[in-house]
């Protein structure tokens, strides 16, 4: 592992296999699970290098004071340390749209960098708007400031150069897709404005680093317990009001996949066969919810019994 500090708070890590062999291929927008620290925390970090490079992965990590421990552990790593990672996963890939608008807030630029690099390689039509508090906190500003398809926006400079949704995004266009990644407040503002102006949900693509405020707020179902039933065995388990479905499944020895535990990565998704889910995630699309997809790490139930395809 190689490391350099791009800003006082952002470290960039270049990862390669210890045996020198190639890593897994991936599509732009993908992320990897990284196991780090004495507690073997598993955290997700977006791959921000060129997707075609198979000998090296690049990730960038913000040392966030509100971190659950992962970013502090990553910033404690030194050159040459070893990490255990999982194969890339991607729920934030480029679509088949003719034009792409990439909106990055702070460290949220990481998955959008790989998208921009891939679109450069294929001649795709796009523009990347990279927003940061200041130039000194923008890890990749020097690489992007002269790029004709990139605009930098800094909070500490003139109002005119800050991101202007009306000017930089505008109203909906059936041939354009919008991609948003960054802190919760930034994402809520951008997505809220886009929805107000009529952008359809299918055109708005997002990846969050933590659950949104709306998702974290209690819902009517949070006050009560319910029962989850497994289709494979017919076994039923009571889900108390203070535990997630995933917690209960693991406590009973059910081998249910998971990663983030916040409803933002999609690793735990299963299908609902009966019952009415209370979706409390930030990863499923409306179409996926309509098809019965469900995140047991964060979502609950509006019906007394919820049957899952497990």
Image (cartoon, rainbow, N blue to C red):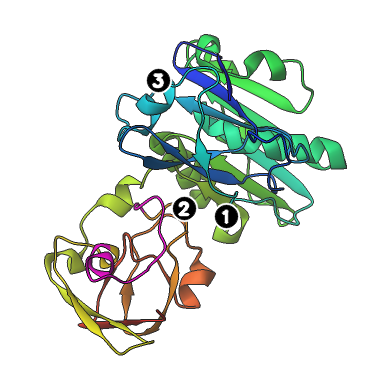
Image x and y of residue 277, in percent: 33, 74
Which residue is disc 2 drawn over? 265
Disc 3, disc 1: CB below 8 Å? no
Task: Determine the residue positioned at 69% across, 43% down.
Answer: 23
Task: Determine the residue positioned at 75% across, 57% down.
Answer: 96
Magenta span covers which residues?
Answer: 247-262
Magenta stretch, overall SS: loop
Which of disc 1 and disc 3 is earlier in sequence? 3
258 drawn magenta: yes
Which residue is disc 3 drawn over? 76
Task: State the image quarter where residue 41 is shown.
Answer: top left
Which residue is disc 1 drawn over? 91
Q: Residue furthest front?
A: 19
Label 1: how many Cα within 10 Å (few below 14, some 14–19, many 20+): some
Quarter of the picture containing the N terminus is top right
Task: Determine the residue positioned at 56% across, 44% down.
Answer: 31
Task: Determine the residue positioned at 31% across, 51% down.
Answer: 214
Distance, label 3 to label 1, CA atoms, is 29 Å
């Amino acid at each position: 592992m190689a490391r350099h500090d791009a800003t006082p708070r952002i470290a960039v890590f270049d990862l390669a296999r210890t045996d020198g062999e190639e890593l897994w291929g991936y599509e732009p927008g993908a992320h990897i699970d990284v196991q780090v620290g004495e507690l073997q925390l598993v955290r997700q970090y977006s791959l921000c290098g060129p997707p075609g490079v198979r000998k090296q992965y690049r990730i960038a990590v913000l040392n966030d004071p509100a971190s659950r421990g992962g970013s502090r552990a990553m910033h404690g790593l030194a050159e040459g340390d070893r990490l255990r990672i999982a194969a890339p996963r991607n729920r934030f890939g480029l679509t088949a749209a003719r034009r792409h608008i990439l909106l990055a807030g702070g460290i949220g630029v990481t998955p959008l960098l790989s998208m921009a690099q891939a679109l450069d390689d294929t001649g795709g039509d796009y523009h990347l708007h990279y927003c940061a508090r200041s130039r000194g906190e923008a890890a990749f500003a020097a690489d992007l400031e002269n790029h004709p398809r990139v605009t930098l926006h800094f909070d500490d400079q003139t109002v005119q150069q800050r991101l202007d949704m009306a000017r930089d995004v505008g109203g909906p266009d059936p041939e354009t897709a919008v991609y948003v990644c960054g802190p919760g407040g930034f994402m809520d503002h951008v997505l809220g404005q886009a929805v107000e102006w009529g952008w359809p949900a299918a055109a708005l693509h997002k990846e969050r680093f933590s659950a949104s405020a709306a998702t974290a707020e209690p819902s009517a179902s949070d006050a009560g317990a319910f029962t989850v039933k497994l289709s494979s065995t017919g076994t039923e388990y009571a889900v108390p009001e203070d535990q997630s479905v995933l917690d209960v499944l693991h406590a009973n020895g059910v081998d249910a996949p998971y990663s983030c535990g916040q409803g933002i990565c999609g690793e735990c998704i299963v299908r609902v066969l009966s019952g009415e889910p209370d979706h409390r995630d930030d990863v499923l699309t409306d179409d996926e919810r309509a098809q019965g997809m469900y995140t047991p790490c964060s979502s609950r139930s509006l019906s007394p019994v919820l049957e899952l395809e497990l």
